[in-house]
Amino acid sequence: MVKFNLIIFHTPKRQHLSDFTAIRERLGVMAADIEVHIVSPEIPMPPDFWRKAAERPTVLFSPMPRNIDPRIRGLRLVARRYSKFEEVRMLAQAGLPVPYTRKILPDTVLDERQWGPFTVVKPNMGYRGRGLRLMRTRDVRWIDTKLLPADDPRHAMNLIAQQFIDTGPYAACYRVMTVLGRPIYAMRSTAVAPLPTLATLADAPVAIEIAANGVERRMELIDDAGIIALAKKVHARLTHTPVMGIDIIREQASGRLVVLEMNSGGWTWHLSSDHGRRHQADHGLDYYGQFGALDVIADALARVTRGRAV
């Protein structure tokens, strides 16, 4: 007997519809008490859909931000985009390891005794490592980004300063995609070209591309217990974001793990996004197969629907 609704919102190009139809098929077998509906531009909706949906406890799940009529019944598990600074602040307040981070304002002057000789500067709402640069700490100053060329990824953006964590001669970063706290895949990006030896640089201003996902890179799946445990802890403490692309780095000298961001805006469903499918093809990756992605997601959605639908 059907007791609950699970309504999944699909965004073309950000997720492939087949992911959600496959999840619906799995739930049809393992959770007959849950009726799964997919709201998508690719699927016509009956005119009385929302009226009928209101008859049962419901969960509304969307990996991307979406405006949903507040009158619609259901627990909302819907992505909401926060700035990078807001994400770091939430992570820090939750007791998670993060780098020093602050907004770059007209009066900003960083103390090298705290920050070290080099600092990362990046757009507060950037993505894919665009506009991220390593600078000498003493040179970090506010600039009017509206005066930068229109094709500069920093154009008209607020900038933030972030502590430089040395991941080794080749910049490296880990990404763990989670859905409702469950790891879906875990991978490492490593820059192909080495960083310059910072200690030997001439004593002049520098602006070095430092993001492993912003340069030519190698990508590989990993099964690192420490990385995955930290990703689980992020969701356990920040449950308001249903889908995360958690970026973690490991300091080379100490092995310390640091969370950079969780990519709350939802552009992280790289199982089947156009971006993610290219990466899997180019680097021989299988995000679906690593941890059994669709089975894991179906189970997570079944549990939350049975436990929290309203």
Image (cartoon, rainbow, N blue to C red):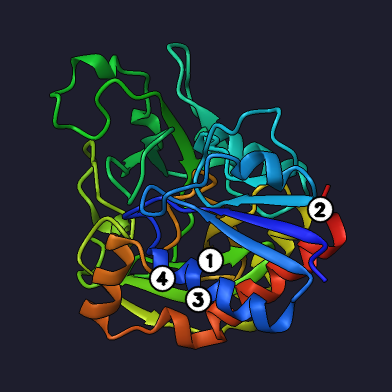
Q: Which residue is mark 2?
A: 309
Q: Classify 10 Å Cα crowding around label 2: few (below 14), some (14-19), many (20 and above).
A: many
Looking at the rendered structure, the kind of residue marked 2 is Ala
Q: Classify 10 Å Cα crowding around label 4: few (below 14), some (14-19), many (20 and above).
A: few
Of residues 4 and 169, the one drawn nearer to the viewer in this rendering: 4
User: Residue 278 lies in what quarter of the image?
Assistant: bottom left
Residue 298 x %, y %: 64, 74
Element at badge 1? strand
| The N terminus lies in quadrant | bottom right
Q: Earlier in the sequence, mark 2 or mark 1?
A: 1
Which mark is in front, 4 or 1? 4
Element at badge 4? helix
Q: Classify 10 Å Cα crowding around label 1: few (below 14), some (14-19), many (20 and above).
A: many
Q: CA distance from mark 4 to mark 3?
A: 6 Å
Q: CA distance from mark 1 to mark 3?
A: 19 Å
Of residues 237 and 192, the one drawn nearer to the viewer in this rendering: 237
Above or below, comparing residue 4 to residue 88 in the picture? below
Q: CA distance from mark 2 to mark 1?
A: 24 Å
Q: Which residue is mark 1?
A: 177
Residue 57 x %, y %: 81, 51
Q: Residue at x 74, y 76 (%)?
A: 31
